[in-house]
Image: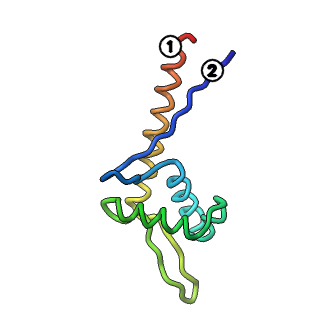
Amino acid sequence: MEYKIKSRLWIETNNQVLLGEGRIQLLKAIADTRSLSKAAKRLNMSYKKAWNLIDSINTNAKTPVVSKSIGGKGGGGTIITAHGKHLIEIFDNINKRCWEFLDKELEQANL
């Protein structure tokens, strides 16, 4: 029999969630599509929920992670700031190392 260990990781600040797997997926989808509405659709999420998540991240982060531009000739868009890209990288790195640690712990447990 093969065992697997499961865990979810999130980062909080002032008792508010800053980042978690879902928020990171949303940020990555925004980076790919350069659009909050397209990112929300990709993740089968309402625009309102996506907007609330991004607003929460921007409010709780040291500096904004997403920047919106209003329409115009080429239309508006949404981009991930340098700080946002940095947070994605940090979260992914911590998450990967956490999974590696948990897998190693389970292996050593000899269940």
- Colour treatment of the image: rainbow
Residue at x 46%, y 33% (from the top left corner): 98
What quarter of the picture does the N terminus occupy?
A: top right
Residue 65: x, y in percent? 41, 63
Rounded to the nearest whole Å, what is the CA distance between mark 2 and mark 1?
Answer: 12 Å
Q: Amino acid at mark 1?
A: Gln
Residue at x 62%, y 20% (from the top left corner): 3
What quarter of the picture does the C terminus occupy?
A: top right
**For this rendering, which residue is in front, 31 or 18?**
18
Classify 88 as above or below 35. Answer: above
Disc sitting over residue 3 in the figure: 2
Within 10 Å of disc 1 (Cα), the crowding (few <14, some 14-19, many 20+) is few
Classify 67 as above or below 5. Answer: below
Residue at x 60%, y 66% (from the top left corner): 33
Q: Amino acid at mark 2?
A: Tyr
Residue at x 60%, y 25% (from the top left corner): 4
**For this rendering, which residue is in front, 80 or 14?**
14
Disc number lying in front (2 or 1): 2
Dot 1 corresponds to which residue? Answer: 108
